[in-house]
Amino acid sequence: RLSTESDSVNSTELALKCLNGAFIKRREYSTVRAAAFAKQLCTVSMHAPPHTSGPLLAFVRQLFQRYPAVHQLLENEQDIITSGAYTPSATDPEHTNPFASSAWELATL
């Protein structure tokens, strides 16, 4: 289905309200889960139109502020000491191993 920009903006606003309610206003999640969502949102924002990627990146910034340990995603890939590989397709965010990779998507945006 083709969507208009206004449909996309409305969908983005709704998604961000849900994410805000889950991660910012609600209880604290594990650092791994928050980092997994931050990494996924960075990846999605690379493929999203500008009117969507901007708000997504602003939410990622809020995640960094709420969960300071997620800042590990901003480190250079050579400095990462976590073993294994990042697995974005894992069904449970706890098993994606987000700290095995940096948030390199931010540098390209």
Image: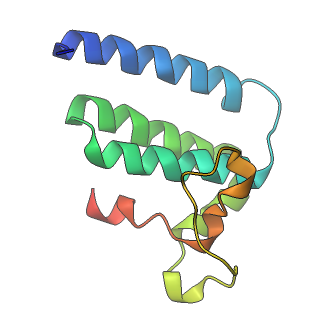
> With 8 as the anchor, is 78 left or right in this view?
right
**Quarter in which the N terminus is drawn:** top left
> With 28 as the anchor, is 8 left or right in this view?
left
Please tell me in which quadrant of the rendered image residue 91 appears.
top right
Residue depicted at 71% across the width and 45% down the height = 92
Instruction: Pick the residue in front: 100 or 2.
Output: 2
Where's residue 76, x and y in %? 50, 80
Please tell me in which quadrant of the rendered image residue 73 appears.
bottom right
Name of the residue lying farthest toward the bottom: 78
Does 13 appear above or below 23?
above
**Quarter in which the C terminus is drawn:** bottom left
Instruction: Pick the residue in front: 102 or 71.
Output: 102
Residue depicted at 16% across the width and 13% down the height = 4
Does 1 appear above or below 100?
above
Where's residue 56, x and y in %? 41, 36
Residue depicted at 17% across the width and 16% down the height = 2
Where's residue 11, x and y in %? 38, 15
> With 28 as the anchor, is 45 left or right in this view?
left
Instruction: Pick the residue in front: 101 or 52.
Output: 101
